[in-house]
């Protein structure tokens, strides 16, 4: 017998951030992700608004991965009455705890500046983690007798999963973010063969990553030139995945003597904590990386690499003479220690900034990457004399062609595709390409829109 399900779009439409979708089926109200909206400040004013539903009415929350734009409003959901179960993979649970604790610190800081209370505190994060249950990849679990969920690899960051929700034998997939496979550490994104409905991301729906295959060679060149100038190379890097990928690549470059000797700093308590989780999660890595680890190489440790956890250690980086590389968060330079380093090093033409990830509209990272002559940091206009470089190949997201190829994997059975998690022009462009090239029904939903689907 055909049943109906309803899908609602409460965040992650018209924008890359704030992912929040509602799936109602088999008498259950299931949220998929509950992310923070992010803009020029770490947290946007939209995060203070009410959810478009009653948090008390939600039975289950499924979490695709531990990036803040997918998890950052969960403690608010809990604070406002959600008492259901939260499911994710084990690494996502562990990384979420670290990420949310760090977020409370930033929110508290912004709240002081705003003269308003923070949207949640550590107490709410502790309450949140009590509701958590993890499941491994590829082990389906029942939500009701007729509705099940299975996590398959999205290949985006450690623990990232696509949610395969199957009702009466018909499957809908919520992708979360989709990785730029093949990635240095992670397994490839799983296929969506046999899937009927798809809700997918489109961050790079209208662009390709030009230098994906040459990313390591470009990294080698950028480092070598920077050391040659005697300058400082700043890399604003996301604490999850990007930092660990870069360490893995640098480990290889250093051990094969492909770059000159240079001090490399990971100057982020958050990235340091996340790297510890990566160290003990090698079972989720791809076969090649598992092989390297089994042969005895510590992929996150090499000569002249320093993890500077405390403020004192961080401050000493400026005192150290000679060329150096500093990796620090946040990845879009809208918070974290990288802002101090940018303020200090941007006005000197000997230095360079290497952009390795997506930069949301309105962030300092976006302005720097788009060639601005100055940028406002901590209330001051800072001249940009340093060279600004980008390697798109390290993006954690599939590009335009690979998103299309991913959809093509489900071409025979797909009936409807919701293109979300992207800036409007990117989502529209991808939806149009899916219609034109694959002849499938792809739409870009608007905020708060609801769709009924047959199962
Ligand atoms: Zn993500």
Image: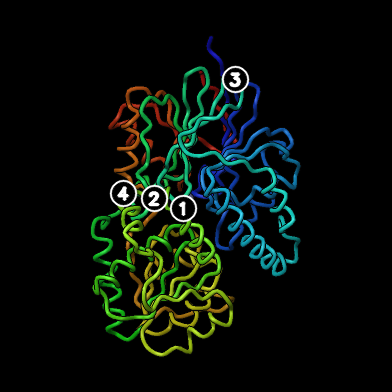
Q: CA distance from mark 4 to mark 3?
A: 36 Å
Residue 224 lies in what quarter of the image? bottom left
Left or right of 298? Residue 220 is: left
Residue on which disc 4 sits: 182
In the rendered image, residue 349, in percent from the top left (x then y), is placed at 36, 84
Q: CA distance from mark 2 to mark 3?
A: 33 Å
Q: Decide which of 66, 374 is in the foreground and name it.
A: 66
Residue 393 lies in what quarter of the image? bottom left
Q: Decide which of 51, 297 is in the foreground and name it.
A: 297
Residue on which disc 1 sits: 281
As drawn, the label of residue 180 is: none
Q: Nearer the viewer, mark 3 or mark 1?
A: 1
As drawn, the label of residue 145 is: 3
Q: Decide which of 39, 185 is in the foreground and name it.
A: 185
Label 1 near label 3: C-beta < 8 Å? Answer: no
* Residue 28, placed above or below residue 95: above
Residue on which disc 2 sits: 285
Q: CA distance from mark 1 to mark 4?
A: 18 Å
Give the tally of numbered discs: 4
- Assess disc 4: are there few (<14), some (14-19) or many (≥20) residues with their C-alpha within 10 Å of its C-alpha: some
Label 2 near label 4: C-beta < 8 Å? Answer: no
In the rendered image, residue 230, in percent from the top left (x then y), is placed at 32, 86
Tell me the residue at 67%/49% (across/down): 129
Residue 360 visible in the snapshot: no
């Amino acid at each position: 017998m055909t049943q109906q399900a309803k899908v609602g779009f409460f965040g992650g439409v018209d924008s890359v951030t704030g992912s929040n979708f509602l799936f109602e089926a088999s008498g259950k109200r299931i949220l998929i992700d509950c992310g923070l909206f992010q803009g020029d400040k770490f947290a946007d004013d939209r995060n203070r608004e009410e959810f478009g539903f009653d948090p008390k009415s939600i039975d289950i929350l499924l979490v695709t991965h531990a990036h803040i734009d997918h998890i950052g409003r969960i403690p608010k959901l809990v604070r406002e009455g959600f008492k259901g179960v939260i499911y994710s993979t084990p690494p996502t649970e562990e990384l979420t705890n670290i990420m949310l604790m760090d977020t409370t610190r930033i929110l508290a800081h912004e709240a002081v500046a705003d003269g308003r209370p923070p949207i949640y505190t550590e107490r709410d994060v502790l309450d949140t983690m009590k509701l958590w249950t993890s499941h491994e990849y590829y082990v389906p679990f029942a939500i009701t007798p007729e509705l099940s969920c299975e996590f398959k690899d999205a290949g985006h960051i450690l623990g990232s999963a696509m949610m395969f929700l199957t009702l009466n034998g018909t499957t809908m997939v919520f992708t979360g973010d989709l990785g730029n496979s093949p990635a240095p550490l992670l397994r490839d994104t799983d296929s969506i063969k046999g899937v009927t409905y798809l809700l997918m991301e489109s961050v790079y729906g209208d662009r390709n990553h030009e230098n994906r295959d040459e990313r390591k060679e470009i990294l080698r060149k950028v480092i070598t030139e920077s050391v040659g100038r005697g300058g400082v190379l700043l890399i604003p890097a996301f604490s999850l995945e990007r930092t660990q990928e870069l360490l893995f690549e640098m480990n290889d470059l250093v051990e094969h003597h492909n770059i000159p000797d240079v001090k490399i700093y990971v100057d982020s308590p958050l990235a340091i904590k996340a790297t510890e989780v990566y160290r003990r999660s090698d079972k989720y890595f791809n076969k090649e990386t598992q092989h390297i680890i089994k042969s005895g190489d510590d992929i996150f440790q090499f000569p002249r690499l320093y993890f500077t956890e405390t403020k004192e250690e961080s401050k000493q980086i400026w005192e150290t003479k000679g060329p150096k590389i500093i990796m620090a968060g946040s990845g879009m330079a809208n918070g974290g220690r990288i802002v101090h380093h940018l303020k200090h090093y941007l006005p000197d033409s000997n230095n360079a900034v290497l952009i390795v990830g997506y930069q949301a509209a309105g962030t300092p990272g976006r302005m720097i990457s788009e060639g601005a002559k100055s940028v406002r940091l901590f209330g001051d206009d800072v001249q940009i004399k340093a060279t600004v470089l980008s390697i798109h190949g390290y993006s954690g997201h599939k590009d335009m062609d690979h998103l299309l190829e991913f959809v093509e994997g489900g071409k025979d059975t797909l009936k409807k595709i919701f293109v979300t998690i992207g800036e409007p022009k990117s989502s529209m462009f991808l939806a149009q390409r899916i219609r034109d090239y694959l002849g499938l029904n792809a739409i870009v939903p608007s905020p708060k829109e609801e769709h009924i689907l047959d199962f």
